[in-house]
Amino acid sequence: MTLKNATPPQDRKYYTKIIDGQPVSNIVEDEFDLMNYRNIDVHDPSQNYHLVDCSAMFNNNFENSLLPYERLAETTIELVDETWTLVENKTELTGEPLAEKQQFVEQQMTFERDAQVELAEDYESKETDPTKKATWQQFITDLEDWTFDPDDKNPVLPPIPESIRPGPPDAN
């Protein structure tokens, strides 16, 4: 339940019902809605409502950290450092969804590798420094030797060596 790039309202507070030290559900509710529409006084201890840190709903950090074969799982409400907290979770793809994603990743990475080889060959053909030319040639070989491993949880192509990385011209 991530609200993409949202800014949490400063005056909003979220609560969940806790019974016997456990959340009744993984649903958090807005204090305003609870008090004004459901007539629940969240500040009355007999109601068993507790404040929940929902900052995870308002950023993409966790979602952006997922590896290619992971997906978001149901959020949970957990007691973290004595504060009820909305916790994002992930799970690994399995079965047909995993096979489909592996095939997609392989196609994308092969396409990217081929494009990088073409660019590297162009740079190598224009290079006049023998050391850099040899580095380009090695990089091209590394790319051509690369093979997709479906068991690699985070497949990557060989990185371009820093010594030949194209970039903006020096400001000198």
Image (cartoon, rainbow, N blue to C red):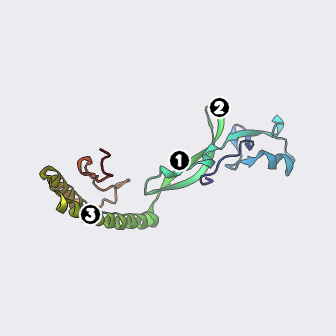
Sequence order check, earlier mark of 1 and 3:
1
Dot 1: within a 10 Å radius of its alpha carbon, few (fewer than 14), some, or many (20 or more) residues? few
Please report the residue visible at 54 percent of the width from the left and 54 percent of the height from the top: 72
Q: Amino acid at mark 1?
A: Asn
Direction from residue 97 to residue 11 in the image, left or right:
right
Dot 1 lies on which element? helix
Q: Position of residue 126 (x, y in %)?
A: 19, 61
Q: Which mark is residue 119?
A: 3
Q: Earlier in the sequence, mark 2 or mark 3?
A: 2
Residue at mark 1 to residue at mark 3: CA–CA distance: 32 Å
The outermost residue toward the left is 130
Nearer to us: label 2 or label 3: 3
Across and down, in percent, residue 54 comes to 65, 44
Judged left or right of residue 98, residue 13 is: right
Q: In this view of the protein, can residue 144 be seen by the observer?
A: yes
The disc placed on residue 82 is 2
Badges 1 and 2: C-beta atoms under 8 Å apart? no
- Answer with the quarter of the image where residue 119 lies: bottom left
Residue furthest to the top in view is 82
Disc nearest the viewer among 1 and 2: 1
User: On the image, numbered disc 1 is attached to which residue?
Assistant: 61
The nearer-to-camera label among 1 and 3 is 3
Circle 3 SS class = helix
Q: Which of the two residues, 92 or 39, is positioned nearer the viewer here?
A: 39
> Which residue type carries mark 2?
Glu
What residue is at 44 percent from the left and 53 percent from the top? 67
**Amino acid type, mark 3:** Leu
